[in-house]
């Protein structure tokens, strides 16, 4: 394990270099082995015909001695004598390596015979030369004849030996060439086997190196695909891949922690926002309640005042109806403390109000209505129409010289329900309309006892209720052209 | 040890990577070592063939020179000589017999003298050139043993063979025996009324061979036959000179006997192995089996077959191996003590129908 760890802890570069060097070394060793095999075989091949070459040289040398002797005997020159002695020396040197033992081997015996005959031959040639120098004609002829006879015998002997050796050398050569082929096969087999093993080794080591990289890639892909719930990579090496894998593991864990934190903080934020919204709602609710509460005593005071005047001027019947209407009106107010009411209820309230006003202002107000009964059940915030009608009365038709009229119509158009309250009063200029819409009325614009703030309250509530801005619209054609308030209710 | 322990630990630790790596490297090492072993074996094998074997070394070197090294007779003599030589640490060789050129006996003698051999065994033939070479060898201090036939006044240290006169007597005895048998058979046919024609006996003698030896041999034959009174008037002894000057001429001369003459001889006495073999074949070819009988020389396989088939009446042979042994013994003895007996007599024996089987075996054993 320790050795594996040692390898595993090496840097990637070193690992690859180690693998390369190891395989290269193995191949080198095998190559050296094969080189050595073939080299020794070639060396042997070189050696095979050495004996033949030597014998050929010996034969040539013998020819040299004979020729030089003949030459000297013919010419008797100093040069010829020098050449003769030189060739004698050569020949003697060459016969040195010949075996002089008598053995059961024919070649060795032949060598011995050649050696012995050569010695005798050289004796005769020397004698012939000596006799020639001594001008002993008869002797030098005899000796040279003897020498020549021996020369022929030795030549034949050398040729025979050469032949013999050639035969056995050829046999050896055949044997060796068979061996060489054999070695070739062995070398090829060894080389192929080693290359195959080497490839296996390289594949294995490279796989071992790239395995963590592959698993890292797989896991990285999973992570890239959004799956953060991957198993943590096993890291048992200290190389670059190991380092990257560890860093990756840390990264995954960090991302997971971060996401968890993020989720927690988002949840907190959501709860906080929800609370905020609730608070806002409560506030609005409170505001609404407050505004509604603001209306009641103000109106109650006026109506009660009117009721008292009526009671003074007329008999009980009309007082009764008046009180009845007023009672309905208050009942509505008391009862409708909740958020939404039906259009029908609101219209009834308007009817009560108009009646009370007509009682109060001696039937000055001509009120007409045109209702699409299918829209009577529309939901809308309470105490909306009455303040508008009140505004029409207070700011539109009060104090005009002509007959004041109020038209209330409910109709359907473009998928929306419309409530239109129109008067033929003094009208209202655009600047004022904008101020009303933006709740920007100054104190001076609001005459005492007016209900201006009440109109803004209505607009605010309608906007809040329907959660849209275009729910309320005031329009006027100009001075003394009347005013129209249009409420657009989405169906 | 530490390394092995480490590996063992790895294997135990199921470390597949380490185990496989180790196995692969081991495999490669094993393959390479295997290759080396195979190569070494092959190399040694070819080496052992090539290298000079452990040859036996000898102290002495004897040259054997004969007229026909390949003949069965001389091969047998050589075998005997070689065996004896091995015992005495001497190597005997058919000298200069296996050369590019074909040399005559005297040339081979000359080469042997030049090669300074320790001793020479030469087939004796009585002619001047050979005698001179024997003399020359003596002058160079090389002892010469003459075999089969003596060369007189040559200074040879010893002669190994059969006395020509003795051999002639043996021939004569066998011839008488055969002649008696044949005459007896002829008499039986004629009821003894007419002795009829004389029995014709022909001795085949060589034109080339020395007259001395042949004369001695012939006188041996004549002596023996002459001493037999019963045959005195009934046989006619004749000689025929065979021309063996050139190659293949002997065979032609023998065939001429069967073709050219009016009367083909009743008994042919052959004095050499080659004459015997040729006569044997001629008798068969000319349909003379049972009419012409042969008394042969030497017991080669062919001649023994002839004896077995009764084409050859008998053959006179000698202990060739003993002959070879004596030669080497004589040389070694002379070299050791500078003196040796001048004459070694070789045992002769007659091979005929009765004993041919036993000689058959004997000969085979020796071979």
Image (tube, coloured by chain):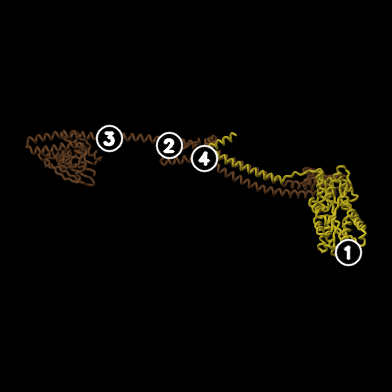
Q: Is mark 2 on a helix, strand or loop?
A: helix
In the figure, what tint was chain B given? yellow
* Nearer to us: label 1 or label 2: 1
Q: What element carries label 1?
A: helix
Quarter occupied by the C terminus of chain A: top left
Disc 1 packing (10 Å; few <14; some 14–19; many ≥20): some
Which of the numbered marks, if any, corresponds to residue B187?
1
**Residue shown at the point (81%, 62%) measured from the top left:** B284
* Nearer to us: label 4 or label 1: 1
Image location (x, y in percent) of residue A269: 33, 34
State which quadrant residue B192 falls in: bottom right
* Nearer to us: label 3 or label 1: 1
- The residue where tag 2 is placed is A252
State which quadrant residue B352 falls in: bottom right
**Residue shown at the point (67%, 45%) measured from the top left:** B42
Q: Which of B13 and A182 is in front in this view?
A: B13
Image location (x, y in percent) of residue A453: 19, 35
Asked whether disc 2 touches disc 3, contact meaning CB atoms under 8 Å apart, the reply is no
- The residue where tag 3 is placed is A278
| Subunit under mark 3 | A
Q: Are marks 4 and 2 on the same chain?
A: yes
Q: Do labels 1 and 2 share a chain?
A: no
Between the residue at mark 4 and the residue at mark 2, the CA separation in whole angstroms equals 24 Å
């Amino acid at each position: 394990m320790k050795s594996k760890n040692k390898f595993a802890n090496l840097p990637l570069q070193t690992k690859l270099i180690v693998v390369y060097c190891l395989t290269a070394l193995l191949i080198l060793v095998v190559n050296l082995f094969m080189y050595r095999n073939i080299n020794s075989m070639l060396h042997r091949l070189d050696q095979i015909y050495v004996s033949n070459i030597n014998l050929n040289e010996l034969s040539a040398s013998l020819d040299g001695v004979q020729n030089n002797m003949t030459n000297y005997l013919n010419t008797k020159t100093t040069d010829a004598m020098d050449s003769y002695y030189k060739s004698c020396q050569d020949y003697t040197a060459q016969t040195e390596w010949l075996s002089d033992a008598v053995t059961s081997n024919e070649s060795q015996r032949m060598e011995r015979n050649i050696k012995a005959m050569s010695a005798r031959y050289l004796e005769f040639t020397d004698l012939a030369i000596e006799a020639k120098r001594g001008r002993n004609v008869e002797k030098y002829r005899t000796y040279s004849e003897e020498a020549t006879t021996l020369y022929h015998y030795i030549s034949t002997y050398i040729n025979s030996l050469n032949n013999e050796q050639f035969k056995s050398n050829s046999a050896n050569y055949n044997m060796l060439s068979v061996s060489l082929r054999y070695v070739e096969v062995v070398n090829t087999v060894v080389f192929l086997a080693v290359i195959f093993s080497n490839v296996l080794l390289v594949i294995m080591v490279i796989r071992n190196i790239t395995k963590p990289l592959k698993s890292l890639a797989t896991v990285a892909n999973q992570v890239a695909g959004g799956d953060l719930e991957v198993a943590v990579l096993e890291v048992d090496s200290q190389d670059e891949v190991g380092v990257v894998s560890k860093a990756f593991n840390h990264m995954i864990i960090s991302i997971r922690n971060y996401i968890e934190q993020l989720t927690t903080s988002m949840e907190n934020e959501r709860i906080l926002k929800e609370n905020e919204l609730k608070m806002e709602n409560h506030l609005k609710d409170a505001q609404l309640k407050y505004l509604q509460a603001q209306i009641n005593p103000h109106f109650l005071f006026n109506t009660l005042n009117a009721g008292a005047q009526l009671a003074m001027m007329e008999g009980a019947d009309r007082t009764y109806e008046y009180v009845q209407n007023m009672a309905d009106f208050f009942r509505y107010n008391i009862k409708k403390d909740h958020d939404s009411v039906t259009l029908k209820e609101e219209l009834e309230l308007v009817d009560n109000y108009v009646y009370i006003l007509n009682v109060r202002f001696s039937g000055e107000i001509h009120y007409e209505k045109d209702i699409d009964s299918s829209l009577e059940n529309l939901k809308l915030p309470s105490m909306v129409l009455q303040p508008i009608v009140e505004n029409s009365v207070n700011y539109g038709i009060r104090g005009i010289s002509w007959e004041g009229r109020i038209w209330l119509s409910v109709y359907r158009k473009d998928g929306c329900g419309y409530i239109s309250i129109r008067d033929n009063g003094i009208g209202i200029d655009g600047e004022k309309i904008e101020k009303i819409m933006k709740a920007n009325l100054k104190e001076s614009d609001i005459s005492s006892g007016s209900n201006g703030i009440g109109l803004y309250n209505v607009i605010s509530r309608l906007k809040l209720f329907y959660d849209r801005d275009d729910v309320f619209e005031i329009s006027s054609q100009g001075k003394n052209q009347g005013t129209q308030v249009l409420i657009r209710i989405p169906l | 040890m530490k390394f092995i322990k480490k590996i063992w630990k790895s294997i135990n630790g199921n470390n597949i990577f380490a185990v496989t790596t180790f196995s692969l490297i081991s495999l490669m090492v094993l393959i390479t070592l295997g290759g080396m072993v195979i190569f070494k074996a092959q190399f040694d094998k070819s080496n052992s063939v090539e290298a000079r074997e452990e040859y036996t070394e000898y102290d002495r070197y004897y040259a054997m020179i004969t007229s026909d090294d390949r003949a069965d007779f001389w091969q047998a003599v050589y075998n005997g000589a070689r065996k004896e030589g091995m015992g005495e640490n001497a190597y005997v060789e058919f000298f200069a017999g296996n050369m590019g050129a074909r040399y005559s006996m005297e040339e081979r003698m000359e080469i042997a003298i030049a090669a300074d051999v320790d001793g020479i065994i030469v087939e004796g033939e009585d002619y001047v050139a050979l005698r001179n070479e024997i003399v020359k060898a003596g002058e160079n201090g090389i002892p010469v043993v003459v075999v089969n036939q003596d060369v007189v006044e040559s200074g040879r240290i010893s002669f190994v063979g059969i006395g020509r006169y003795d051999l002639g007597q043996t021939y004569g005895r066998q011839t008488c025996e055969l002649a008696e048998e044949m005459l007896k058979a002829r008499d039986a046919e004629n009821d003894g009324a007419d002795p009829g024609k004389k029995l014709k006996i022909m001795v085949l003698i060589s034109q080339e061979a020395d007259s001395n030896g042949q004369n001695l041999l012939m006188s041996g034959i004549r002596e023996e036959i002459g001493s037999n009174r019963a045959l005195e008037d009934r046989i006619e002894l004749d000689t025929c000179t065979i021309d063996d000057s050139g190659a293949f001429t002997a065979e032609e001369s023998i065939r001429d006997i069967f073709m050219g003459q009016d009367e083909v001889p009743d008994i042919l006495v052959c004095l050499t192995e080659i004459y015997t073999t040729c006569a044997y074949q001629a008798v068969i070819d000319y349909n003379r089996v049972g009419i012409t009988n042969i008394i042969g020389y030497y017991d080669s396989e062919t001649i023994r077959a002839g004896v077995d088939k009764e084409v050859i009446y008998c053959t006179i042979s000698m202990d060739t191996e003993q002959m070879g042994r004596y030669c080497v013994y004589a040389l070694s003895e002379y070299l050791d003590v500078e003196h040796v007996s001048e004459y070694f007599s070789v045992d002769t024996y007659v091979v005929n129908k009765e004993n041919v089987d036993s000689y058959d075996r004997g000969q085979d054993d020796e071979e």
